[in-house]
Amino acid sequence: MASPARSPCVVFRLLALTIVACLFAARVARSDETDRPPDQGGFTHQMGIPPLVRTMVGAEYLSYRPSDAHELGGLFNVGMMRYLGHPIVGLGGLGVEIYGGGRAQQGDFGARTYFTIPSLRVGAGMDFNLESDERDFILKLDVPMRRGGIVGGGSAMTVRWLPTRGQTFTVGVSVPLADPEAGRTRPRSDYVRMDARRPRRLTTAGGSAADSIP
């Protein structure tokens, strides 16, 4: 039987595997043999304007640092953000998250509220922990790490920092829900690798070489 101190790490691993499995299943479900690129006879479709409300789910590794101990744990979270203004501009947004999991030998549950700047991927707000009855200032950062998402599907690496709660922080992964276009509009590579061939020089009617034809 696993010791209580190791149970949060086990919970975090299970949550991470669940997110990866759901992401893989969603990608397989979206794939279709008749969905071809336009240059191969496929169809294009209009994406339209992104929705004003975005929903996310994620898992976090927790480092909780009260005054007398250092506790590790894992959290599962579900969040929602509402854009203020046009979602493409991303000047502001209001968000809320609920989270639950465990640390050391006890559970850990609570909620967070944020004001975010989506274009900069940063936010600030308050964390309300129901288990310890604490209310603290929180900063957040969501970074995709690479084009299309850290594990695809528009996913991002998340960092949460509570400076007034003994430098408590979390690191995890979040995945958008109900957004089939997330991560699909940004190819992995933003460049084309060229081979080592040199272009053949053109010649005029008289046989002399020319770099270009007017």
Image: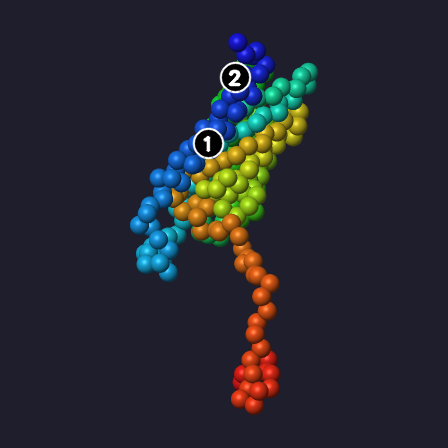
Q: Secondary structure at mark 1?
A: helix
Left of 186 or right of it: where is 71? right
Dot 1 amino acid type: Ile
Left of 114 or right of it: where is 178? left
Q: How many marks?
A: 2
Dot 2 amino acid type: Gly
Q: Quadrant of the C terminus?
A: bottom right
Q: What separation in Å lies between label 1 and label 2 (alpha carbons)?
A: 21 Å
Pointer 1 local density, CA inside 10 Å: few below 14, some 14–19, many at least 20: some
Q: Can you tell which of label 1 and label 2 is closer to the viewer? A: 1
Q: Pinpoint residue 110: horizontal percent, then vertical percent.
A: 50, 24
158 to 74, vertically: above or below:
below
Whichever of labels 1 and 2 marks the residue nearer the N terminus, that label is 1
- Badge 2 is on which residue? 107
Specify the quadrant of the image occupied by residue 200.
Answer: bottom right
Residue drawn where x is 60% and y is 86% of the image: 208
Q: Is residue 168 visible?
A: yes
